[in-house]
Amino acid sequence: MKLKLIVPVSVEQRRWVRYFALPPLNLLYVAALTPKDVEITLVDEHVDRIDFEEEVDLVGITSLTATAPRGYEIADEFRKRGVKVVLGGIHSSALPQEAIQHADSVVIGEAENLWPEVIEDFKKKRLKKFYQSSQKPSLENLPLPRRDLLQGKRYLTKNFIMTTRGCPFDCDFCSVTRFFGKRHRFRPVGDVIKEIESLKGNFTVFADDNVIAHKKYAKELFKALIPCKKRWFSQADLTMAQDEELLKLAVQSGCEGV
C-alpha cells in the first residue's frame, strides 16, 4: 500500500513561504502512527511539487483555512484519478461537512486515536465518511515523528518539537482551543529531552502555541534543557515578562527569542 501525505500552500504564500518553511510536524506524527507495511511519501508544497501521475493508493491532506482552497483542488485532482482522499487538519475539523465534498473521508480533531483505524478501514475497503474521537489523546509515549521523510528537503530547521497541546484562554480570534481543547496536556519532560538529544545541531523550534502557558511545566522543562546546551525559539504570551524566575530559566536553557 502506498500513502501520500500532502501539505498544500496557497498562491499568496508561494512568494515568500519557502524562505521560512518549517516541517509539517502533524503529518510526521501521522506517518509515525501508520503501520510499517505502508509505504509513505511526504509532499510539502512549501518545498516540493506534487506529481499527480505517481502511483498511489491513498492520499492524506492537511490544511489550515488559508490553504483549504488549494487542499480541495489537490483532493479533487486525485479523486478524478480514482484515488481515495482523506482530509484533516484544523479547517477540515472545523467544517467537516464542507471538507467531505472534496474527500472520501474526514478526520476530525487530533489523529492519534483515529489514524490506525483509518488505515485499517481503507485496507478492508470500508472507509467511513467521518472519524472523530470522543477523547483527546494522551501525549505520553508518543512515537517519534518520522523525520526520515524530510531527507532531501530544505527547511529553516528540521528540529521542530511539540511539548504541549491545549489552551484555556479560548480567544475569539484563535482556533487552538477549539481544536486542541481547553485543558493543557503535556508530554513528559523526559520524553522531550530524549527527543531533543536525538536531533542533529544545536538549534530547536518548539511548535507549542504558547510554550509558557503552564508556568510550572515550563519551568520544569527549562531546567531540564539547561544541560543540553541547545538554543531554541518558540511562541509565548506577555505574561512571561512578569515572571522573573521563568525569564532567567528561559535564558539559561538557551532561549534565543519568542
Image (tube, rainbow, N blue to C red):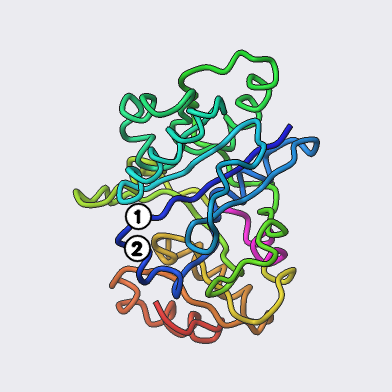
**What percent of the width, then of the height, locates residue 104?**
48, 23
Q: Nearer the viewer, residue 191 or 18?
A: 18
Q: Residue at coordinates 57% horizontally, 18% vertically from top-left? A: 127
Residue 121 part of the magenta segment: no
Residue 194 part of the magenta segment: yes
Q: Is residue 192 left or right of residue 75?
A: right
Q: Residue 108 occupies which quadrant of the picture?
A: top left
Q: Residue at coordinates 52% horizontally, 17% vertically from top-left? A: 128
Tell me where the magenta segment starts and ends, as one range: 187-195
- Assign the C terminus to one quadrant of the image: bottom left
**Number of marks in the image?**
2
Res. 10 mark: 1
Q: Is residue 145 above or below residue 212?
A: above
Q: Nearer the viewer, residue 257 or 151?
A: 151
The answer to whether mark 1 and mark 2 are in CB contact below 8 A is yes
Q: Is residue 105 above or below residue 19?
A: above
Task: Report the residue marked by disc 2.
Answer: 13
Can residue 181 be seen in the rendering of this structure?
no
Q: Residue at coordinates 65% horizontally, 35% vertically from top-left? A: 56
Res. 23 mark: none
Q: Secondary structure at mark 2?
A: helix
Residue type at mark 1 is Ser
Q: Nearer the viewer, residue 162 or 35?
A: 35
**What percent of the width, then of the height, locates residue 64?**
36, 48
Which class describes the residues within 10 Å of circle 2: few (<14), some (14-19), or many (20+)?
Answer: few
Q: Is residue 209 above or below residue 119?
A: below
Residue sticking out furthest to the front? 53
Which class describes the residues within 10 Å of circle 1: few (<14), some (14-19), or many (20+)?
Answer: some
- Assign the N terminus to one quadrant of the image: top right
